[in-house]
Image: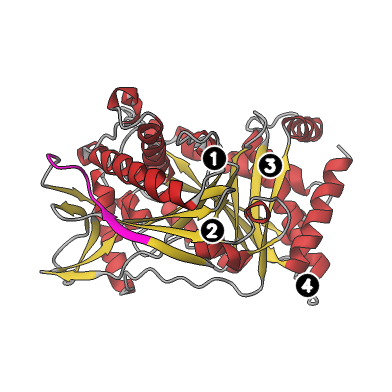
């Protein structure tokens, strides 16, 4: 458990814009009622409680305030209209702030940062819950961001982030974390902030020739879902981290190409995801008492940043969501067969290539229609991306010792996290949250398969 040392609100510094409003685009609408995203960064740091209170807490609050000067909407709210005439927006007004909790715990730091199976519920002590939505004239206001910093006395510090996905995707949130880390590391001196970290806010760059914005919002209104942040830790899961090395990835690529030389999208991402997918399905067959129908369809879904896919391209620092979804599907019997990984790589590559080359496919919403075909109970999706290196977020304490995606537990399917390795360039880390029995089966199949490369 974590006990509270201080709970406070951190706002952008005086002199910032008094208010800021950003309309939600169709890229944002799809995340409006999505579960909140929760991440934890763990840092090894030998520090006493008194030093934490006297030095770390004030410095973190000051640097966070400066970071919010650049990422002001994160201190605001998602404003969802209470009647059918309005449209949702991201809104900051003077007085808005980020809820920050400083806490301490006597839990085993080294246990939590391990790769071995750990009780999933343990991690929920170190991520905050967003405050309840508030009513404003014509709107309901749902907070965008909350942060929890926890001291493991003389061992380390964790920083837990909970954010509303409608406010921004991984590129936006990771950019904010990097900026906060840099400002803290360099004592608040903003000259150390590279220009490529400063957000771009102009929403007019999102083209919408087919009216997706209005049609998506019309669909969202029908769902009539509430804006509360609901936290339900799973009672019987463990989380585990697996690493696939650059050498193993290279051997997987060679294996795939030896079987199907004409494939053009055999990348670290596609071969890693395909391998995890096949291992997961095999682990289900090894542990489930009921035999799965050979002809049932298995689904894989991932999101891709499409800022560079527009003509002209959007700035990489565009603030908000700019993701399209890629879906691959395959019969169960084909995925667990000898050619399963090869077929999976081919299908993943085809799905990604279609989206990366075809702006029209993005603009007309074809990618959205594919999601209506997905059976969530038979799906694997990806959280995070090796492109966004949170292990580079150095607050002045060195690189994080561990990154955990706590929100893997949400949804009916399985979600895997994927990130750069904390230790070696080219290696990839995969995070999973499964029942203990399923995790043991997956680990055995994962290790056994790699040993034969």
4 or 1: tag closer to the N-terminus: 4
Q: Which residues fall within the magenta stretch?
A: 6-15
Q: Earlier in the sequence, mark 3 or mark 4?
A: 3
Residue marked by disc 1: 352
Q: x, y (%) of residue 319?
A: 30, 40
- Residue at screen point 39% across, 43% down: 55
- The residue positioned 64% from the left and 37% from the top of the image is 421
Q: CA distance from mark 4 to mark 1?
A: 31 Å
Q: Nearer the viewer, residue 106 or 215?
A: 106
Q: Residue at x 56, y 66 (%)?
A: 376
At which x and y percent is residue 178?
41, 36
Which element is circle 4 on?
loop
SS at mark 3 in the image: helix
Residue at the disc numbered 2: 406
Residue 184 falls in image quadrant: top left
Residue 114, position in %: x, y?
A: 69, 51
| Camera-side mark, 1 or 3 | 3
Nearer to us: label 2 or label 3: 2
Image disc number at residue 272: 3
Please indicate, yes or no, whether residue 322 appears anywhere in the rendered image: no
Q: CA distance from mark 2 to mark 3?
A: 21 Å
């Amino acid at each position: 458990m974590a006990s509270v040392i201080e709970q406070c609100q951190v706002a952008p510094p005086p002199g910032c814009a008094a208010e800021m409003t950003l309309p939600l685009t169709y890229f944002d609408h799809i995340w409006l009622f999505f579960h909140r995203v929760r991440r934890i960064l763990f840092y090894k740091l030998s520090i006493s409680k008194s030093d934490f209170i006297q030095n770390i807490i004030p410095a973190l609050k000051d640097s966070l305030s400066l970071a919010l000067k650049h990422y002001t909407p994160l201190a605001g709210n998602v404003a969802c209209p209470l009647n059918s005439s309005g449209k949702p927006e991201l809104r900051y007004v003077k007085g808005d702030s980020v809820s920050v909790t400083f806490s301490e715990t006597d839990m085993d730091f080294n246990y939590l940062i391990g790769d071995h199976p750990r009780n999933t519920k343990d991690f929920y002590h170190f991520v905050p819950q967003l405050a309840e939505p508030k009513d404003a004239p014509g709107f309901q206001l749902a907070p965008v961001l909350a942060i929890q910093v926890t001291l493991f006395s003389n061992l380390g510090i964790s920083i837990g982030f909970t954010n509303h996905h409608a406010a921004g995707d991984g590129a936006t949130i990771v950019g904010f974390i990097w900026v906060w880390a840099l400002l803290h590391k360099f004592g608040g001196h903003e000259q150390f902030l590279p220009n490529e970290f400063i957000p771009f806010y102009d929403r007019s760059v999102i083209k919408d020739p087919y009216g997706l914005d209005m049609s998506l919002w019309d669909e969202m209104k029908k769902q009539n879902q509430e804006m509360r942040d609901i936290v339900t830790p799973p009672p019987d899961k463990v989380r585990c981290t697996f690493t696939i090395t650059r050498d193993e990835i290279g051997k997987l690529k060679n294996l795939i190409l030896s079987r199907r030389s004409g494939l053009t999208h055999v990348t670290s991402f596609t071969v890693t995801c395909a391998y995890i997918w096949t291992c997961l399905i095999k682990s289900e067959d090894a542990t489930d008492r009921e035999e799965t129908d050979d002809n049932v369809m298995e689904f894989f879904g991932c999101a891709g940043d499409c800022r560079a896919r527009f003509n002209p391209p959007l700035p990489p620092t565009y603030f908000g969501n700019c993701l399209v979804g890629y879906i691959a599907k395959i019969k169960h019997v084909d995925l667990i067969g000898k050619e399963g990984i090869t077929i999976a790589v081919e299908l993943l590559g085809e799905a990604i290539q279609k989206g990366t080359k075809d702006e029209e496919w993005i603009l007309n919403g074809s990618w959205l229609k594919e999601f209506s075909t997905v059976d969530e109970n038979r799906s694997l999706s990806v959280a995070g991306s090796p492109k966004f290196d949170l292990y580079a977020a150095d607050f002045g304490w060195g690189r994080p010792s561990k990154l955990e995606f706590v929100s893997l537990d949400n949804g009916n399917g399985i979600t895997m996290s994927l990130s750069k390795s904390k230790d070696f360039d080219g290696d990839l880390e995969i995070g999973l949250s499964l029942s203990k029995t399923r995790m043991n089966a997956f680990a055995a199949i994962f290790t056994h398969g790699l040993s034969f490369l």
